[in-house]
Amino acid sequence: MKKTLIALAVLSAANVVNAAEILKTDSASVDFYGQLREELKQRGSDIKKGDDTSTTLSSGSSRAGVNSIYTINDDLDVLATVEFGIGQSNSGDSRKHYIGFASKEWGTVTVGKQSILTDDVWGAENDWIGLGYSVLPEAGVYDMAWLQDAMIKYTLEGSAGWFKAAYSYNNGNDDPTTAEMFAGTTFGNIELYGGVGYQEDKTTSTKNEDITITSGGASHTVEEKITTVHNTELKHGMLTVNYVGDGWNLGTTYWHAEVDDNTKNTKLTSDSVALAGSYSFTEKLSLYGGYEYIKDFQQENNDFNGVYSGLLYKYASWTKVYAETGFNDSDKLGNDSYWGVGVRIYW
């Protein structure tokens, strides 16, 4: 789910430069797009889960899909997109599937399985390895689940700026209810955008755990099914300011989030500040880095600090290579350093 500092595209699939053309007529276009992500990384431990990890080589969130656009008239198009995972752990999984209408004057409306606006808009965080946690609705107990099964999304862009709104239905509590609204504009070299979001999660999740039972001097391991009933509310808001210079940029994002666990009758409030930027040595090679601070990360009195830097090489529009290292520190969970290299191929 790596993003640039700001993503203003109406449909990410429609903007894939290297998409393979399947069909092209005066009234229709169908493109096959995708990206392969190979990444080698090493971590001392997982600061979220608290367990040790080793050096891994994975295809991450590689994906492919088909994007279709059908023209109704000069101002109205019908859209249809389906996207599936092609990584070693998500091969064949449905990532997105939605249909909609796009109007140059009135904006775009899509309905189906889609990503939350928090994931679309992102903020000042540009680490390619993806170990940053400052986007609070995707960190620990602030998790909104970046995909929602039944979402209505609206996007409007104009000379004055852009506006995005989304609502996802709970499907009889099979999914959480979410609602988000974001807006942004540009003043010269300055990009300014922000928004608010809400989630009510009353879903039920089930997982299997191995339990060891000792009887008569002998131990037996059995599998037990554990069901968890959720009853939480998440409220969050963010504001980002980004300055785009000649070959460089620098941005900062502030997040505020509150989680109410009605089952445990507890509330956790957290704030996050992120700073990120990049500098281009050449048209293809750039240096990037950032810092993030999170107050009360996942639990009270657990402040988090993270810093990272890396080199990004864009050989062509269809590929990029990166190398990154970073260090994270948490008051209660300890510290964690990492390094990684990766390559992405687009079509």
Image: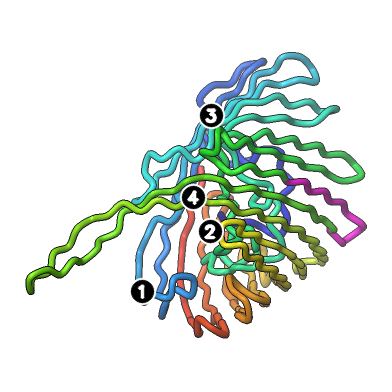
The local secondary structure at tag 4 comes to strand
Q: Amino acid at mark 4?
A: Val
Residue at mark 4 to residue at mark 2: CA–CA distance = 43 Å
**Residue position for label 1:** 53
Q: Quadrant of the N terminus?
A: bottom right
**Residue position for label 4:** 229
Q: Amino acid at mark 2?
A: Lys
Residue at mark 4 to residue at mark 3: CA–CA distance = 46 Å
In magenta, the rendered stretch is 180-191
Residue 312, given in percent of the width and then of the height, sits at 58, 67
Q: Residue at x 48, y 81 (%)?
A: 336
Residue at mark 4 to residue at mark 1: CA–CA distance = 30 Å
Residue at mark 2 to residue at mark 1: CA–CA distance = 26 Å
Query: Which one is in front, 338 or 272?
Result: 272
Which of pointers 2 and 3 lies earlier in the amino acid sequence?
A: 3
Instruction: Give the vertical position of 187 relative to 74 (above or below).
Output: below
- Between label 4 and label 2, give the one nearer the viewer: 4
Instruction: Give the vertical position of 262 relative to 169 (above or below).
Output: below
Which of pointers 4 and 3 lies earlier in the amino acid sequence?
A: 3
Whether the magenta-drawn stretch holds residue 188 is answered as yes
Residue 178, given in percent of the width and then of the height, sits at 66, 44
Q: Amino acid at mark 3?
A: Glu
**Residue position for label 3:** 21
**Residue position for label 2:** 320
Instruction: Give the vertical position of 239 relative to 340 (above or below).
Output: above
Left or right of 52 on screen, residue 186: right
Residue 225, given in percent of the width and then of the height, sits at 31, 51
Q: Amino acid at mark 1?
A: Thr
